[in-house]
Image: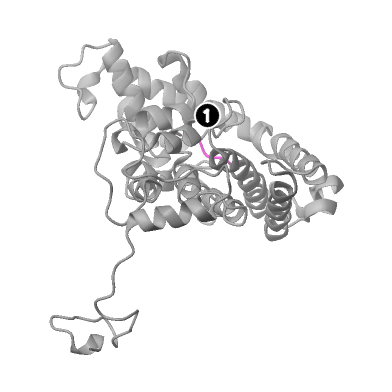
Amino acid sequence: MSPSSLPDLVVAHAPIEVGVPGSVLTSRQEREEHEGASLAPHATRASGAGRRAVEEEPDRFRTCFERDLDRIHHSKAFRRLAGKCQVFVAPEDDHLRTRLTHAIEVSQVAVSIARPVGLNVALTAAAATGHDCGHGPAGHASEGALSPFVEGGYHHAVYGADVVLQPLNLCVETLDAIRNHSWNRPAPSTPEGEVVAWADRLAYVCHDFEDAVDAGVVAPGDLPGEVAEVVGTDRRSQLHGFITAMVETIADTGRIGLRQAEADALAAFRAFNYERIYLRPEAVAQADLSARLIAGLAEFYLTHPSHLPEGAGLVPGSPDATAAAVKYVSGMTDRYAHRAAIDLLGWDENKLPRTA
């Protein structure tokens, strides 16, 4: 029987055959068995519903890590990254990166490393996609601004895993990779998490440099020779060089890392970015201004919790009001935070943060 003769079949275009009608579907369990046999010895294996804070029934077709990736993709926290800056606050150029495009690029880099070396691609993609969901408005400026209101300080990786993404009930391996993707955090517990940590750094040094070139902050020729001679001066060459080197290094050593030549180039690249892009006086001034704005909003909401969407009944200045204020402000996009500063704090619209 052909697909076109099956009853109740609606097609978007001409009927396209996939297989024999009535064929048996490949179950999740069969895919897990195939995965277990094909992945590298120390890669993370999916199993049933996965290890979650709240137990769930396994999905019929998706592995536990594929399910995590879907949940992150559909979350508001992930969508709001479109309105949070990567480096440039409120830029006029729509082509400059946001936290959303950064997360997408990190996932692409991480998967490009994980796939050929036999790691779990779904876990890698899920952790990379969700790794920055804990960032507040104005990028890293929000961490210093919100730290006084959080016991132990505000770290976007920790806050993202333990607060922002907590309602999604993700697998412990996914949350661990998100919580520990930053290099100033403990090592992730899985090789996939370690790949995400590297992919984050590889992605941002390359695309932040490209954005800075487009913004006229630096020129391609400014890149130190120890970087350009190893991986080139354009993002395509740089990412290809770094990713290839990582894959070959993992294959040669059986461990996740980067051989010396590219590792030195990456360190020099990052140092250049800090000196010429992130810590240039104009950028620091705007980051300080952003931090003042964000801290001001947190202070306002914790002392006026009735202005919070779910602030009814919260005692002003209480720990609960403080936690609610931090969660609300950290979830704001740059544009929403700026509007709130104008409406609630009386900021002059012409004096809002804007990275030149």
**Quarter of the view holding residue 190:** top right
Q: As displayed, is residue 120 above or below residue 137?
A: below
Observer-nearest of 293 and 146: 146
Report if residue 93 is visible in the image: no
Tell me the quadrant of the picture where the C terminus can be found.
top right
Q: Residue 315's spot in the image, x, y percent?
A: 21, 11
Q: Residue 173's spot in the image, x, y percent?
A: 45, 36
Name the residue rendered at 24%, 12% in the picture. Answer: 316
Residue under label 1, please give it: 141
Name the residue rendered at 70%, 49% in the picture. Answer: 246
- Circle 1 SS class: helix
Report if residue 300 is visible in the image: yes
Q: As displayed, is residue 104 above or below residue 139?
A: below
| Image color mode | one colour
Observer-nearest of 284 and 82: 82
Query: Left of 43 or right of it: where is 81?
Result: left
Query: Left of 229 or right of it: where is 150?
Result: left
Tell me the quadrant of the picture where the N terminus can be found.
bottom left
Give the residue at the far left of this rendering.
Answer: 8
The boundaries of the magenta stretch are 352-356
Residue type at tag 1 = Ala
